[in-house]
Amino acid sequence: MNGRMQFVLVLLLAGMSFFAGYGFGKQENVPKADQETAGKQQEAHGHGNDRGSAVSMTTDAVWSAENAKAGENATLRIHIQDEEGKPVENFDINHEKLLHLIVVSKDLSYFDHIHPEYKGGGDFEITTSFPAGGEYKLIADYVPAGGSTTTQTEWIKVEGTSVDAVPLQPDRHHSKIVDGLQVTLQNDHPRAGQDFELNFLLEDANTKEPVTDLEPYLGAVGHVVILSEDTEDYLHVHPVDEKAKGPEARFVTNFPNKGIYKIWAQFQRDGKLITVPFVVEVE
C-alpha cells in the first residue's frame, strides 16, 4: 500500500471513530404512544425514595414533635421550605390531599397513614398519638406546585414504656382477614429490579363471595405502601385501575433491592378504612 492510500485510510478510520463517539446510527425515536405508555407505567409504579426530587425546585422539611409520649396526643408539624430557607407556599393536590404522612414504628409493627392540615406558609400540622415508646419514622409525600412528588423523612423518639420488637418474618400464607374482608395477595414472589404486579383478590370473609362494592379511598380503589425491613426503601403505590371496585385490585411496582419488605394494602368498604399487612421476601 503506497503512502497516499495509507493517508486516506487513516483519515477514513478517524472519521468513523469520531461519528461513532457521538452515537450516530444509534439514536432511537420512541413513538409518542410508547412515551405515553411509559408515563402511565411510571404513575402506576407510584413513588418513593425521592428526597427533594421536585422538578422545579429542591425542597426540604423541618420537623417538630410536641409532647411525643406514648398514649398521649402529640402535635406533629412539618415546615416545607426551598433551598434558600423560604417557605413553599403552594402545593398540588395528590390523591385528594396536599400531604400524605406515613408513620411506622422501627420494627414496622405499627403503621398509620394520616393527612396533616395545611396552615399556610409551608406549615402542615396534625394531632396524633403513638401506642408505645420508642423510635418512629415519619415519611411525608407532597407535590410543590409545578413540581413532582417529593418524599421527606425523619426519625423521632417517643417517650414512654416500649414494647418488645416484633420480628419481621415473611408470611407463609398470603391471605388475611381484616374487618370482615378476606384479602389474598395472589402473586407473592417478587424479584428485585423488575416490574412486579401486586394482585389482591377481595372476598367477603363470611360468605366467600367476591367483593364488588369497594368505595374510593383518596380517589382510588386502594393504596399500597411498602417499606424494606431497614425502612430505607419506601414505595407508595397507586392502582393500575383507580376506578375498580373489586374483586381484584392491581398495583405495579418495582422493588429496588432484595430483602424482606412489609406491604400495607388499604381499601375502603361501608365507610370503613381497612388496612391489610403482608410481609414478602424479594429475591
Image: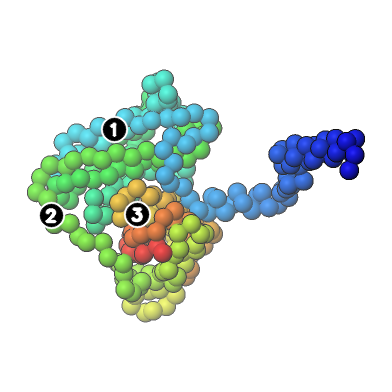
State yes or no: discs 1 and 2 in contact (Cβ < 8 Å).
no
Specify the amino acid type for callout 2.
Answer: Val
Neighbours of disc 1 within 10 Å: few (<14), some (14-19), many (20+): some
Question: Going by the image, does 18 lie left or right of 48?
Answer: right
- Residue positioned 22% across, 35% down in the render: 65
**According to the image, label 1 marks what residue?**
63
Report, in whole angstroms, how far the alpha carbon at label 1 lies from the one at label 2.
25 Å
Specify the amino acid type for callout 3.
Answer: Ser
Callout 3: helix, strand or loop? strand
Question: Going by the image, does 22 lie left or right of 188?
Answer: right
- Please tell me how many numbered marks the rendered image carries: 3
- Residue positioned 13% across, 57% down in the render: 164
Q: Position of residue 159 (x, y in %)?
A: 12, 42
Answer with the quarter of the image where residue 100 lies: top left
Specify the amino acid type for callout 1.
Answer: Trp
Q: Which mark is residue 228?
A: 3
Answer with the quarter of the image where residue 6 lies: top right
- Between tags 3 and 2, which lies in front? 3
Quadrant occupied by the C terminus: bottom left
Asked whether residue 99 appears in the rendered view, the answer is no
- Residue positioned 16% across, 46% down in the render: 134
Quadrant occupied by the N terminus: top right
Q: Position of residue 5 (x, y in %)?
A: 89, 39
